[in-house]
Image (spheres, coloured by chain):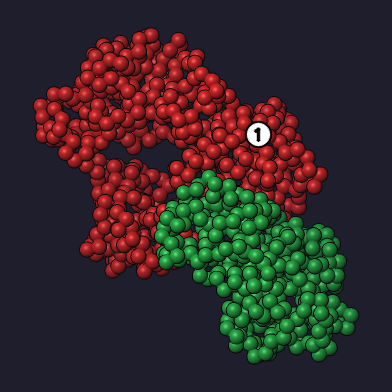
């Protein structure tokens, strides 16, 4: 059978006719397989959801217990039959619970990677390359300009700045699921042992991470009740980037605005966002990771989705690998 | 993480360009000077002050180099996305793991290789350096060879950082500066207390200037008019003309050498002295040009003969610091003034004249003169104590500036941008416009931008107004509802207007600030562009 008969885009999302399921659908469907808990991939209202236990837990935290009719947990590496199709979840290294989904039917194997990264990350299982015929890759940072430095270097710059400006607060913008916890864990691994102050939007998910055995150290709410302006002197505060434009940010003394994102590689992006200390820390693969992964999967065909498809398709052409953009709608850029 | 010196320089540039506050920049600079060794720190200083000479590489050459190394289509996608050639090349430059393992060059090595490169092997040398450097170091190298760091740090600010480092007055640095050359090892040694202050060896060095303080409320009542001389305050640029041993230099008030921009005036400097005065254009015997005229001569690297003839530069002198070997700075203003009067008489009258003293009997009489100056290029009066010696810096008391009242215009708030640091959650930078176009189809045209002049309470009020009346958002900027029926009127004070080809309105304000919030005034009654144009033609 042709690979496109096994998986192809529909308005609801990526559909598998022989298995009758969708992967990361953006509209409510009967059966959804979900790669990870970010809200553009994991939506509420499906009749049944198959995902890793951690992804299901995260969806429960975000949407409440009734987020789906029924749920089923997929253990990593366990093969599950859905009609004539078998599916296997493999770690994607993106955020806690994130998985690639391997779909096999009549000898054809497609891996839908969801979002993934290759840099080591203490807050989730590392990405596992899976041999396949077709590899569906994201392309969020699918341009040769995106080259993420080691996250430890970025955290070292943050800590250096806290030493240079001890009288100011450092406000780190980081997405509530995954990035925020990774930044906190990196701070701990770098030896930072003061309490980290967090915005309320991070509390539930950070608790969950700690409960899953990912030690983030002492976290304090960044509320006015918990302290006056003086208490935030020299503090590191982590919150969703959107909060920094809010009146919420006024409680901090002369804050330096930092933003942890792969987009921070581009100076103009940092400048436009009023970011003083860009931290190039991403949940996604950079250009070198994307191209190395494509080769590792041994796939004969590459489908490129959400992001800058054209550059990655061009690279595949140059490498003699068949590739085409897969036009899926409804997924957001990290950071927008 | 061990950073090589080149990486530390690259990191400094990256942080400076995104740090808006002056104090923040000073901290970054002094930390860098303190922690980086010679000669790298001195070369970094020279790069920032514009005193580092490296043969330039043209952008086209840079593009050729990168195209030889990667697919042009992928480069095209990359450049389209980033929009900046230096940054794109620094990011996409292919790097083999073998290169990374190699020793990363120091700034001194980079500079030495670039300076030694001939025109023909320049590109090859550059490519070799880029091969051996990391991404941010590559960006710094490219900025060095393409000229212009554009990091928002003036030479003056770099000197202030040096002064902070050594806990000395910036005047001491300025006075030494032109006698020193990169990498400034003797300067750093002195600032760190490891050596004596460098001796002044070069000729025609800058002498730090004496500055005035504004006349505040009630200041004059405490002063005796007979203790002070008054002069017009000319709206030109403050310059210091120094000639010594055949070396001629024209300095700005911060000690930048501007001789190159004013060859006509520099040619007429055939004396042995240091004069303080105002640079203006026109013919001192006939007519003095306005500030708009003077603008034709400013911010130019070189100046054509035509422009020199159309807007000849001259110096209106008001002080003398040195004649021959005699340092006159300890003398009183009274004594210096009589030496100056005699000295200026010996100079070319088409290039040098004397700023006249203004006769007055009491403060009320002077107030009348201040309000109605003789000439548009006069922006107020200066008061100088007869017995004051010439002291560097801005002591309060001996010299006062008493400016003409500012112009004001009622404009409508159009865009607001979030501030930084203490103001990072406030919309604190305002773009405002006035009405233009025929009656019935008026449109707002932006005429300026201001970010101070209001109280903290007013800032909170405007911030709330901006948030409640946003019609569009672009990053940190919000477009605010502003039409005939609704809009926030701001009374904007400014010192003067220049013609501008860069702004749609054709005018650019000097020193605009918010003087009052006019919550009471309907937007439709704000001023029209013609009001400003009339000011321009005066």
Give residue B523's position: percent from left, percent from top: 27, 63
Subunit ID for the residue under disc 1: B
A120 sits left or right of B484 in the view: right
Residue A257 visible in the shown view = no
The secondary element bearing badge 1 is classed as helix
Residue B294 visible in the shown view = yes
Quarter of the figure with the N terminus of chain A: bottom right
- Is residue A290 positioned above or below B514 on the image? below
Name which quarter of the figure residue B31 lies in: top right
Quarter of the figure with the C terminus of chain A: bottom right
Q: Which chain is red?
A: B
Total marks drawn?
A: 1
Mark 1, Cα crowd under 10 Å, few <14 / some 14-19 / many 20+, is: many
Name the residue beneath numbered marker 1. B107
Q: Nearer the viewer, residue B509 or A248?
A: A248
- Is residue A268 positioned above or below A17 on the image? above
Name which quarter of the figure residue A14 lies in: bottom right
Which residue is pictured at 47% across the width and 51% down the height?
A: A168
Give residue A317's position: percent from left, percent from top: 80, 62
- Is residue A24 positioned above or below B187 on the image? below
Q: Nearer the viewer, residue A259 or A310?
A: A259
Which residue is pictured at 81% across the width and 90% down the height?
A: A83
Q: Nearer the viewer, residue B303 or A57?
A: A57
Which residue is pictured at 62% across the width and 28% down the height?
A: B39
Which residue is pictured at 21% across the width and 24% down the height?
A: B385
Give residue B167's position: percent from left, percent from top: 45, 30
A224 sits left or right of A288 in the view: left
Chain A visual colour: green
């Amino acid at each position: 059978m042709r690979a496109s008969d096994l998986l192809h885009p529909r308005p609801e999302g990526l559909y598998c006719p022989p298995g009758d399921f969708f992967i990361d659908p953006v509209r409510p469907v009967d059966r959804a397989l979900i790669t990870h808990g970010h809200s553009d991939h994991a939506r509420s209202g499906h009749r049944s959801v198959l995902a890793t236990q951690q992804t299901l837990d995260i969806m429960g935290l975000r949407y409440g217990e009734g987020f789906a009719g029924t749920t089923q947990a997929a253990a990593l590496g366990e093969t599950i039959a859905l009609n004539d199709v078998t599916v296997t979840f493999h770690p994607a290294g993106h955020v806690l619970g994130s998985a690639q989904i391997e779909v096999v039917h009549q000898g054809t194997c497609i891996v839908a990677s969801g979002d993934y990264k290759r840099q080591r990350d203490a807050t989730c299982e590392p990405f596992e390359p899976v041999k396949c015929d077709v590899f569906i890759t994201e392309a969020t940072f699918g341009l040769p300009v995106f080259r993420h430095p080691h996250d430890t270097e970025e955290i070292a710059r943050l800590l250096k700045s806290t030493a240079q400006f001890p009288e100011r607060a450092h406000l780190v913008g980081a997405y509530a699921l995954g990035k925020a916890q990774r930044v906190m864990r990196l701070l701990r691994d770098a030896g930072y042992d003061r309490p980290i102050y967090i915005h309320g939007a991070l509390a539930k998910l950070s608790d969950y991470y700690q409960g899953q055995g990912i030690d983030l150290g002492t976290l304090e709410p960044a509320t006015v009740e918990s302290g006056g302006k003086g208490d935030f002197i020299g503090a590191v505060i982590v919150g969703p980037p959107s909060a920094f434009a809010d009146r919420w940010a006024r409680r901090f003394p002369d804050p330096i605005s930092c933003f942890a994102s792969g987009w921070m590689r581009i100076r103009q992006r940092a400048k436009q966002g009023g970011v003083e200390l860009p931290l190039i820390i991403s949940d996604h693969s950079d250009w070198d990771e994307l191209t190395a992964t494509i080769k590792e999967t041994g796939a004969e065909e590459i489908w490129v989705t959400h992001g800058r498809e054209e550059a990655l398709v061009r690279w595949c052409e140059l490498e003699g690998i068949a590739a085409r953009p897969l036009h899926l709608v409804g997924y957001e850029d990290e950071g927008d | 993480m061990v950073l090589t010196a080149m990486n530390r320089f690259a990191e400094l540039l990256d942080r400076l360009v995104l740090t808006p506050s002056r104090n923040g920049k000073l901290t970054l600079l002094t930390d860098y000077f303190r922690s980086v060794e010679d000669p790298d720190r001195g070369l970094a200083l020279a790069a920032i002050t514009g005193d580092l000479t490296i043969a330039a590489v043209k952008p086209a050459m840079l593009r050729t180099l990168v195209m030889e190394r990667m697919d042009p289509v992928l480069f095209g996608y990359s450049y389209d996305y980033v929009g900046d050639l230096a940054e794109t090349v620094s990011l996409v430059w292919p790097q083999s793991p073998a290169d990374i393992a190699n020793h990363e060059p120091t700034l001194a090595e980079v500079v030495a290789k670039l300076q030694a490169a001939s025109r023909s092997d320049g590109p090859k040398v550059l490519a070799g350096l880029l091969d051996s450097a990391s991404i941010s170091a590559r960006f710094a190298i490219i900025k060095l060879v393409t000229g212009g760091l554009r990091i928002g740090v003036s030479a003056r600010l770099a000197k202030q950082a040096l002064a902070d480092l050594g806990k000395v007055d910036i005047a001491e640095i300025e006075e030494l500066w032109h006698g020193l050359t990169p990498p400034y090892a003797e300067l750093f040694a002195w600032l760190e207390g490891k050596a004596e202050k460098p001796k002044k060896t070069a000729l025609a060095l800058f002498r730090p200037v004496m500055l005035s303080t504004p006349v505040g409320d009630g200041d004059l009542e405490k002063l005796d008019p007979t203790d002070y001389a008054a002069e017009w305050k000319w709206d030109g640029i403050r310059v210091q003309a120094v000639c010594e041993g055949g070396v001629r230099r024209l300095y700005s008030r911060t000690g930048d050498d501007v001789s190159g921009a004013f060859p006509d005036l520099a040619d007429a400097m055939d004396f042995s002295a240091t004069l303080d005065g105002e640079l203006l254009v026109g013919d001192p015997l006939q007519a003095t040009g306005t500030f708009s005229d003077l603008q034709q001569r400013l911010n130019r690297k070189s100046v054509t003969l035509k422009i020199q003839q159309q807007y000849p530069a001259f110096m209106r002198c008001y002080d003398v610091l040195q004649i021959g070997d005699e340092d006159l700075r300890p003398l009183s203003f009274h004594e210096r003034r009589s030496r100056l009067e005699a000295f200026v008489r010996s100079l070319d009258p088409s290039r040098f004249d004397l700023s006249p003293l203004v006769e007055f009997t009491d403060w009320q009489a002077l107030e009348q003169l201040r309000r109605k100056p003789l000439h548009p290029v006069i922006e107020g009066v200066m008061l100088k104590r007869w017995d004051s010696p010439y002291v560097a810096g801005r002591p309060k008391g001996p010299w006062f500036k008493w400016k003409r009242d500012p112009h004001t215009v009622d404009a409508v708030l159009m865009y607001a941008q979030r501030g930084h640091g203490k103001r990072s959650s406030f919309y604190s930078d305002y773009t405002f416009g006035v009405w233009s176009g025929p009656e019935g189809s008026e449109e707002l045209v932006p005429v300026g931008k201001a970010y101070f002049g209001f109280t903290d309470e007013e800032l909170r009020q405007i911030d709330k107004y901006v948030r409640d009346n946003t019609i569009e958002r672009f990053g940190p900027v919000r477009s605010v509802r502003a039409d005939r029926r609704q809009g926030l009127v701001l009374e904007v004070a400014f010192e003067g207007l220049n013609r501008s080809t860069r702004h749609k309105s054709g005018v650019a304000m000097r020193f605009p600030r918010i003087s009052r919030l006019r919550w009471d005034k309907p937007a439709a009654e704000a001023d029209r562009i013609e009001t400003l144009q009339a000011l321009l033609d005066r």
